[in-house]
Image: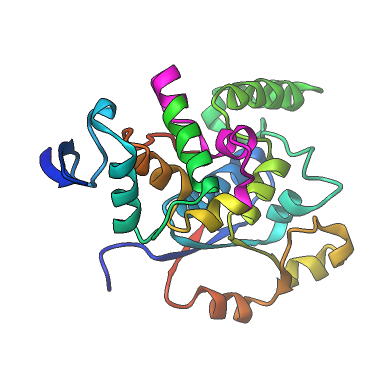
Amino acid sequence: MSTVTLAGAEVEVDPEGFLLDARQWNEQIAQEIARQAGIDALTERHWQVVNFMRQSFLDTGSAPSIRTLGKASGVPIKELYELFPKGPAKLAAKIGGIPKPRGCI
Amino acid sequence: MSDTVEKVSIIISRGSLEGIYPGLIMANGARMEGIEANVFFTFFGLDAINKAKHEHVKVATVGNPGLHLATWAGGMPGVSALITHQLAREMERLDIPPIPEFVEMIADSGAGIFACKASVDLFKLTSEDFIPQVNDIITVGEFYGLAGGGQIIFT
């Protein structure tokens, strides 16, 4: 665990940069994590995925699988990988300020 | 060699449920981590991409000591279907898709889906027999060409 400054706020992150406390998150932090991951600007479609991930986590306590993400977020799998080429579930979770998804699927 | 995996080529050679899933899970998992992935279906593994067969893949209940089922019992009519059905229900609970949907998901994630030419010829199949997600029917040599710069995983 370490503390980093993102968008002017001090937040606690795990070794891979995932926020440890979802309550410390805000939209500026999301933009900054996205920039560091190579996504210059979050589009409306990115936000749709990020918000879905975050909301699912807040509602259920765990991040959705890539299958659920593709079916229920309104963004199909193909587009998910275009939006987040380095792994949609992982990256959307990171940008959304929730822990790294632990599922294998 | 770098200490991170950047690319994998996964060979699926078996046609049982337990023979096909591990390779699919590895391929999907690779793409989820942003790792480039190719899947090469050979021998009975071709059933996973065969339009007429991919919905009917079953658990091997004979000669499968992991099931802890007597061989004679595993060979009784309907046992393989029953155990396959139970396993499918458990997988659905864990949000693991059935094989046809899983292969489509993996293709949509940008992984390459390939059929082995020698096996296709052996079983007298043509590209018409396969799901549309199959990129190509390729030779072993072409597979090695595609696999260049990455790891090869045989299942």
Please determine whether, in this image, residue A79 is positioned above or below residue A13: below
Q: Which residues are magenta?
A: A56-78
Q: Position of residue A29 (x, y in %)?
A: 28, 43
Please determine whether, in this image, residue A29 is positioned above or below residue A42: above
Residue B63 position by quadrant:
top right
Instruction: Please indicate, yes or no, whether residue A42 appears anywhere in the rendered image.
Output: yes
Q: Would residue B99 appear left or right of B36 to someone viewing this image?
A: right
Residue B96 position by quadrant:
top right
Q: Position of residue B59 (x, y in %)?
A: 67, 33
Q: Would residue B70 appear left or right of B78 to someone viewing this image?
A: left
Q: Would residue B46 appear left or right of A13 to someone viewing this image?
A: right
Please determine whether, in this image, residue A79 is positioned above or below residue B144: above
User: In the image, what residue occupies the spot 19% across and 39% down?
Assistant: A13
Give yes or no for residue A71 being in the magenta stretch: yes
| Residue nearest the viewer, comparing B17 with B31 | B31
Q: Quadrant of the N terminus of chain B?
A: bottom left
Q: Position of residue B15 (x, y in %)?
A: 69, 47
Instruction: Please indicate, yes or no, whether residue B72 appears anywhere in the rendered image.
Output: no
User: In the image, what residue occupies the spot 63% across and 76% down?
Assistant: B140
| Residue nearest the viewer, comparing B133 with B50 | B133
Q: How many marks?
A: 0
User: In the image, what residue occupies the spot 30% across and 35% down?
Assistant: A26
Give yes or no for residue B133 being in the magenta stretch: no
| Residue nearest the viewer, comparing B76 with B114 | B114
Q: Quadrant of the C terminus of chain B?
A: bottom right
